[in-house]
Amino acid sequence: MGQERPLISVIVPVYNVGDYLHDCLASVLAQSYRDIEVILVDDASTDGSDRLCDTYAARDQRVQAVHLSANSGPSAARNEGIRRARGEYIVFVDA
């Protein structure tokens, strides 16, 4: 029988990174390792990054968008991502 590959949770804190988010996510989603979940934690962006998160979540079932109601900083965004992560391994990627 084939060996199952572990799920990897990729947590991306998002705050006003609209200029970089597309390139970041294109790179993450193009990896040859497909058993990933990408958790985008929008930290109350004001530049439209929140809508980009929703767009990616609607296009790819591996992506989920989480929106914090107030800007709380990257540590809070990472911690929220950890709370939602289901993977055996967790990695962080900054946009």
Image: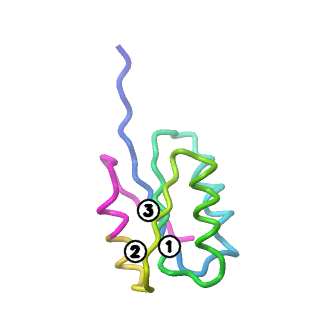
Q: Position of residue 74 (x, y in %)?
A: 42, 80
First in sequence: mark 1 or mark 2? 1
The answer to which of 6 and 51 lies nearer the viewer is 51
* Kind of residue indicated by mark 3: Ile
Say if 90 sits above or below 5 in the image: below
Residue range (magenta)? 80-95
Q: For the residue carrying disc 3, how many other residues have a C-alpha within 10 Å: few (<14), some (14-19), or many (20+)?
A: many
* Kind of residue indicated by mark 2: Ala
Say if 4 sits above or below 30 in the image: above
- Magenta span contains residue 92: yes
Q: Position of residue 2 (x, y in %)?
A: 38, 18
Say if 49 sits above or below 53 in the image: below
Q: Which mark is residue 77?
A: 2
Residue assigned mark 3:
11
Say if 57 sits above or below 45 in the image: above
- In space, the residues marked 3 and 1 are separated at their CA atoms by 11 Å
- In space, the residues marked 3 and 2 are separated at their CA atoms by 9 Å
Q: Nearer the viewer, mark 3 or mark 1?
A: 1
First in sequence: mark 3 or mark 1? 3
* Kind of residue indicated by mark 1: Asp
Residue assigned mark 1:
42
Q: For the residue carrying disc 2, how many other residues have a C-alpha within 10 Å: few (<14), some (14-19), or many (20+)?
A: many
Residue at point 36% right, 28% down? 4
How many numbered callouts?
3
